[in-house]
Image (spheres, rainbow, N blue to C red):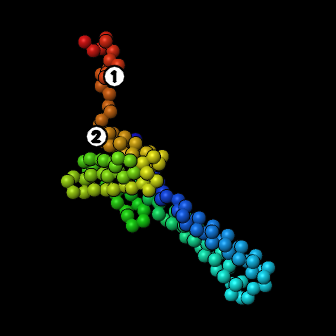
């Protein structure tokens, strides 16, 4: 059963850019009101417009970067493909020899033998639901590709609460 799942890792929201843009637009609006009340000259009338346009341009650039900087990881039963800004890499589960995550879970590394590495970084950190779903999906697919998790009707023993009828 070949099921393809596409995971999306999104960049952090550029909060600082939005705050700066809001300040620029607000200052521009205040200067428009002041210059209109004071009957200021052309320079003082143009400055608020420039500030407001700069603020709106900054919002546009921030939104465009949020869309453009997304990374797409497509996984299926055979392997994976990573596409994003400046990357288009694919591999098979058979070639993956080890998988590690950083201590906070934001950096996933797929090892291919002794030298090859594929790094997946999540700017939102390891608590991001999309990163957690990706790690769980990769783990399950690696287990499936190696035949782990197949049951042989052997009762499982909980080491913290063993059943006296099973453990002699």
Residue drawn where x is 63% and y is 68% of the image:
23
Q: Is residue 71 left or right of residue 155?
A: right
The disc placed on residue 113 is none
Residue drawn where x is 43% and y is 45% of the image:
132
Q: Is residue 37 above or below residue 116?
A: below
Residue drawn where x is 25% and y is 57% of the image:
116
Q: Position of residue 45 (x, y in %)?
A: 71, 83
Figure disc tally: 2
Q: Position of residue 91 (x, y in %)?
A: 31, 54
Q: Is residue 148 above or below residue 105?
A: above
**For this rendering, which residue is in front, 65 or 29?**
29
**For this rendering, which residue is in front, 143 or 119?**
119
Q: Which residue is mark 1?
A: 160
Q: Is residue 93 above or below residue 30?
A: above
Q: Is residue 128 left or right of residue 81?
A: right
Among all residues in the image, which is located at the extreme left? 114
Q: Earlier in the sequence, mark 1 or mark 2?
A: 2
């Amino acid at each position: 059963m070949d099921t393809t799942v596409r995971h999306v890792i999104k960049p952090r929201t550029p909060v600082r850019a939005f705050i700066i843009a809001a300040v620029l637009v607000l200052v521009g609006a205040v200067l428009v009101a002041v210059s209109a009340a004071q009957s200021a000259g052309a320079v003082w009338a143009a400055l608020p417009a420039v500030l407001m346009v700069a603020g709106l341009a900054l919002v546009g650039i921030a939104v465009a970067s949020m869309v453009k900087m997304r990374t797409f990881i497509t996984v299926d039963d055979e392997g994976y493909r990573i596409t994003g800004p400046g990357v288009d890499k694919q591999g098979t589960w058979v070639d993956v020899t080890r998988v590690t995550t950083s201590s906070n879970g934001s950096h996933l590394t797929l090892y291919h033998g002794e030298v090859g590495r594929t790094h997946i970084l999540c700017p939102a950190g390891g608590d991001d639901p999309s990163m957690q779903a990706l790690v769980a999906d990769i783990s399950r697919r690696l287990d499936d590709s190696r035949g782990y998790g197949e049951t042989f009707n052997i009762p499982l023993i909980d080491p913290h609460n063993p059943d006296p009828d099973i453990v002699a």
